[in-house]
Image: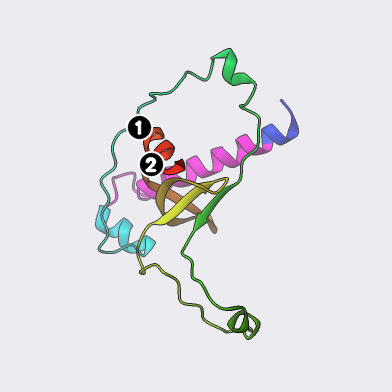
Amino acid sequence: MSDETEDQQALADEWAAAMEEQVTDEGGGAVDPDELLAATGAVGTSVELDELQDEGTPVSDPKLDVILDIPVTLSMEVGQTDIPISNLLQLNQGSVIELDRVAGEPLDVMVNGTLIAHGEVVVVNDRYGIRLTDVISPQERIKRLK
């Protein structure tokens, strides 16, 4: 295994351990969901998650092996706004830009500029992450491309 692959696996293991710690308290019992929401700053928000089911082509499919190592850009969009260039040039440290999103609204998860999911920000081991709350179906993604 290459150093890069080992580093990626170590980081994935660290995230998995941190998420496990987030679910249980120090005594080993289950954490009250309201306490967990309060600790993450998401008080008053509740999300029902469906079980993920793999309906796609299995990863062992030889046709997919060709593309599995192609890197893609994953980004989270908090919001956006349109402003004139004259206002853009006047921005400086401390300026506030109003976005088109309401506080607490889910972020858009984009892959190469295409919306694939919605999620909420989480903090694990002093790093930001995103918990997916809604994944856009492949059929819906194809509809949005047209």
**Nearest to the observer: residue 90 or residue 93:** 90
**Nearest to the observer: residue 89 or residue 107:** 89
Residue 120 location, quadrant: bottom left
Secondary structure mostly seen in magenta is helix
Residue count near mark 1 (Cα–Cα under 10 Å), binned few <14, some 14–19, many ≥20: few
Q: Are marks 1 and 2 in contact (CB under 8 Å)?
A: yes
In the image, residue 109 sits, relative to residue 135, either above or below, namely: below
- The answer to whether residue 22 is magenta is yes
Q: Dot 1 corresponds to which residue?
A: 52
Q: Secondary structure at mark 2?
A: strand
Amino acid tagged 2? Val
Residue 28 locus on image (x, y percent): 34, 44
Real-space CA distance between mark 1 and mark 2, rounded to the nearest whole angstrom? 9 Å
Q: Residue at x 35, y 69 (%)?
A: 102
**Nearest to the observer: residue 21 or residue 57:** 57
Q: Which residues are magenta?
A: 7-32
In the image, residue 48 sits, relative to residue 51, either above or below, namely: below
Instruction: Name which of mark 1 and mark 2 comes first in the sequence.
Output: 1
Please indicate whether residue 76 sits to the left or right of residue 46 in the image: right
Considering the image in quadrants, where does the N terminus appear? Answer: top right
> What label sits on residue 135 in the rendered view?
2
Residue count near mark 2 (Cα–Cα under 10 Å), binned few <14, some 14–19, many ≥20: some
Q: Residue at x 57, y 20 (%)?
A: 64
Considering the image in quadrants, where does the C terminus appear? Answer: top left
Q: Residue at x 48, y 47 (%)?
A: 18
Residue 3 locus on image (x, y percent): 74, 34
**Nearest to the observer: residue 106 or residue 22:** 106
In the image, residue 46 sits, relative to residue 6, either above or below, namely: below
Residue 74 locus on image (x, y percent): 56, 47
